[in-house]
Amino acid sequence: MTLPPTTPKDASKIEAIVEKWTVPIGNLFVSLFHRIALFGIGAATVWSAAVAFMGMMAKGSASIEDLLLLFIYLEIGAMVGIYFKTNHMPVRFLIYVAITAVTRLIIDLVNTKHEADLPILYMGLTILILALANAVVRYASSKYPSKAGENE
């Protein structure tokens, strides 16, 4: 029968042994989850884009909102591809998706209301703020690039 550790040094040895086995297994599970999730997101993006495209084909035309929706799918697909290859989330692509989505909303509002009102102005300001955020992210990533291997 083994007695529990009696000194902090004995406990440190046990902790080191446990960590030696659990950290690689945990890293493996996280990596597998990322890969499976990326395949799922990629497949859902392709599926959604195909459904939207088939809807345009059935309708016989594509509106500007339809085309912007396809651009959103393209940007999401690019984001998944970049994350799959580099293990880094390209924040700029999220900003591009947001700008495209807000632009799509503006066009939809103008097409339905046929007038320029305050919500459209607010959405325009939202696009301006997102564009400024993109400029800040680009400046920061060029001025302060991340070091390879850091936080991995």
Image: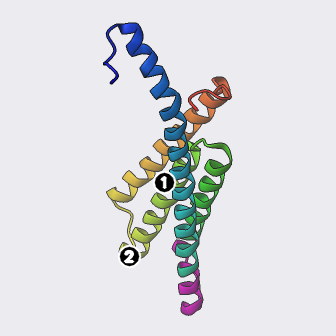
Image side of residue 36 versus residue 110, left or right: right
The percent position of residue 98, horizontal first and vertical second, equals 48, 54
Is residue 114 one of those drawn in magenta?
Answer: no
Number of numbered callouts drawn: 2
Find disc 2 in the rendering and name its residue. 112
In this rendering, the answer to whether 29 lies above or below 1 is: below
Q: Quadrant of the C terminus?
A: top right
Find disc 1 in the rendering and name its residue. 98
Nearer the camera: disc 1 or disc 2: 1
Which of the pair 2/79 is nearer the observer? 2
At a point 37% along the width and 51% down the height, the residue shown is 122
Image side of residue 97 versus residue 124, left or right: right
At a point 57% along the width and 65% down the height, the residue shown is 73
The percent position of residue 149, horizontal first and vertical second, equals 65, 29
SS label for mark 2: helix
Secondary structure mostly taken by the magenta-highlighted segment of the chain? helix
